[in-house]
Image (tube, grey):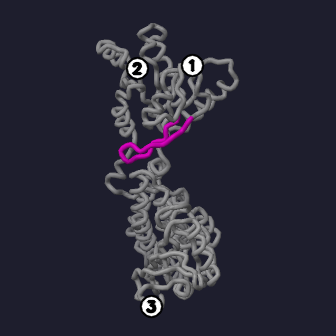
Amino acid sequence: MILNDTIVALASAPGAGAIAVIRVSGPDAIAYTSPVFKARNKKTLQEQASHTVQLGNIVDDIRIIDESLVSVFKGTRSYTGEPTVEISCHGSPFIQQEIINLLLKQGCRSAKPGEFTMRAFLNGKMDLSQAEAVADLIASDNAASHQMAMQQMRGGFATEIQKLREELLNFASLIELELDFAEEDVEFANREQFQELVTRIQKVLSRLIDSFAVGNVLKNGIPVAIVGEPNVGKSTLLNALLNEDRAIVSDIAGTTRDSIEDEIAIGGVGFRFIDTAGIRETTDTIEGLGIKKTFQKMEQAQVVLYLFDAEKIKTQQLSLEQVKTEIEKIKNRFPGKPLLIIANKKDSLTKEEQTAYQEAITDLHLISAKEKQGVEVLQDKLLNFVNTGALKSNDTIVTNSRHYDSLLKAQEEINKVQEGLNMGLTGDLLAIDIRQALYYFGEITGEITNDDLLGNIFANFCIGK
């Protein structure tokens, strides 16, 4: 990896805006920026104190390109751990490109995606799990995903893993030492204490692995499928939940022939609502494909909302028994999947009718999607399906599939160590599995890495971060 050159990139979002930030990092960051910046105080950037902001002009020979603020970070006290300059200029795309072109002419190289953060990791400013959390933080679009990214970025997850790794490494060293004195039959590693450590590691790994199920869903948004017969108000409900006209609403049955998805945050948690094609018998090929996709979306969803038209029961186009039959079909097809049963058009029912429906169907929720009655209560009910206990107590939650995979492999190796202890295996055999467990712990925090792994991780970052 090339770390001895100087890179430049736009660090703010591309496009026009009030201001833009251009980041320069590397051993010659100050030397390359100084010739194109004329400070108001007449000093060169080399003469400016570190961690100061200077006002001046960005110039190309005698042509002034922009009046800008330039922040100087000397030495290793910067985001990347190397000399850094950040230029805050006006947000014209033309100005941004002109400044970047100037710096490229001075000798800078265009930064690759995530290269600034990769340098921060390689220079010891953060471990690998913290570096990955930077991308999650940038991508966070609700309070839950933001909180999880911040918790990981502060090093909570890495600290827990590093502590276990250090303790395991200490015992591994003692067991390795025993191998040097095999003939004397000396035991340096206390087996009882080692057993206690292995048991504790198993508990921590199990908790972290189990947290992935919650973390992955919270990070990506909880998928909720809205299902039911055609023309019962599914699209109207989606529009009411999103508070915008996202789906086409029509009196014609079968209007929605493909799934429509959109996401909102409820109580700080992201929900991805999926409006599906109405379920019914049909000879229409296209509508039939939409219905097939409905069942696929139900399979993928974390929560299913089954909606029926309460007014049709009142007009005897539908019976409560038919509704119950459809509910049982869904429960039998997707056992264990949370199901929320909703009767639409409550505004057309009397109080007595509403009570009768709720007595006939357990946990029935009445709404009027068109009038947006009961929608807020429905949102509260959805939140009750989400396990946010770990989030509220600020526990470590695993959200990264790479970490999850390494944790599973570490757990497998630790279980082998446990089996070895139970069988009374010798130190040399225990050492093999301990080394493998240490390897997978190291993969998470970055003590053990390679160019391909780093390339895959940081390629997913945006340029300039």
Q: Residues within 10 Å of mark 2 (few under 14, many from 20)?
A: many
Q: Secondary structure at mark 1?
A: loop
Range covered by the magenta-colored residues: 260-274
Q: Nearer the viewer, mark 1 or mark 2?
A: 1
Image spot of residue 463 (x, y percent): 58, 66
The kind of residue on which mark 2 rests is Lys
What numbered label is drawn on residue 345?
Answer: 2
Quadrant of the image occupied by residue 439: bottom right
Q: Earlier in the sequence, mark 3 or mark 2?
A: 3
Q: Residues within 10 Å of mark 1 (few under 14, many from 20)?
A: few
Tell me which residue sits at (40%, 20%) in the image: 345
| Place of residue 31 in the rendered image (x, y in percent of width and height, measured from the top left) | 54, 88
For the N terminus, the quadrant is bottom right
Q: Is residue 375 left or right of residue 399?
A: left
Q: Residue at x 63, y 72 (%)?
A: 451
Viewer-proximal residue among 418 and 128: 128
